[in-house]
Image: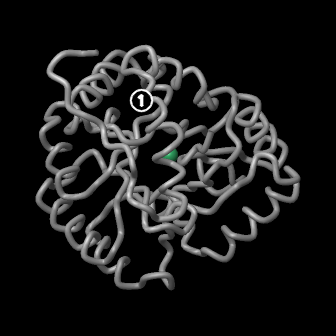
Amino acid sequence: MIDIHFHCLPGLDDGPSNWDEAVALCRAAAADGATRLIATPHVLRGEWINEDVDARDDLVLRLNTLLEGSPAILPGCEYLFSTEALALLDHGTAGPLIGLNRSRYLLVELPAEVSQASVEAAFHEFGVGGITPVIAHPERHPALRRSPERLARLVSRGARCQVTAGSLLGDFGERAADAADEFFRMGLVHFVASDAHSLGRRPPRLAAARERVRRAWGAEAEQGIFEANPAALLVSEPIPWTPPARAVRG
Ligand SMILES: [Fe+2]
């Protein structure tokens, strides 16, 4: 499996604080069935600036060396959306934002308080610039939980959605679990990722989430979400599986 959202670069954010923890976390993901992990440190989020892409690349290289290639660590980041988004987009590859595996897919976290109109306008410009935003864990976002049609509008404008594995397994409470189910019913879920941070607090649980998706939504959804879509993302291809909206849970 490919895990497209994973905090494994030590000392950059609220993920592992040292190399031993980073290696143990990545090995746990491999034991859970992940072969490739995209390192997505928080960028431009409060105290976590992490603007230096070269410094991040050095950590990816070092972690790959320590892991001897298994699992493979790929570059990426998790960008906290702000009013700077379009200015950052103008910086292109000279800026702090890189796509997942340097693809055209950019992992974007939406702040709790954000104007729908500003996100829609920015995502439109992202699309014009050839970038597809992947919205990180919308099921944990209060406004999107309250108003799923907001998420639907962003998806209709080209955004894609990543639900967090733990949300499907009840790790983030009933509201996140219910919202994830609602987004599945509405056909708004394109990826599931672990968003792993640590073995204790936020461990990688992709295999259990995959089983949950297969049982609840069928083998086709499972294959699309856990195999075909992340494989296409890695190489900047359009995702091959788009979920059907269902009036009644299958
Ligand atoms: Fe994250």
User: Quarter holding the N terminus?
Assistant: top right
Percent across and percent down for residue 162 are 40, 42
Q: Is residue 229 above or below residue 217?
A: below
Which of 239 and 39 lies nearest the eye of the viewer?
A: 239
Q: Which residue matches tag 1?
A: 220
Percent across and percent down for residue 113 are 22, 48
- Residue placed at 12% from the left, 39% from the top? 149
- Residue placed at 34% from the left, 34% from the top? 140
Which of 202 and 74 lies nearest the eye of the viewer?
A: 74
Q: Is residue 22 above or below residue 128?
A: above
Q: Dot 1: within a 10 Å radius of its alpha carbon, few (fewer than 14), some, or many (20 or more) residues?
A: few
Percent across and percent down for residue 9 are 69, 54
- Residue placed at 66% from the left, 67% from the top? 56
Which of 225 and 66 lies nearest the eye of the viewer?
A: 225
Q: Is residue 187 above or below residue 83?
A: above
- Residue placed at 44% from the left, 38% from the top? 224
Describe residue 155's horizontal placement relative to residue 1 as left or right: left
Percent across and percent down for residue 71 are 76, 46
Mark 1 C-beta closer than 8 Å to ligand 1? no
Which of 208 and 84 lies nearest the eye of the viewer?
A: 208
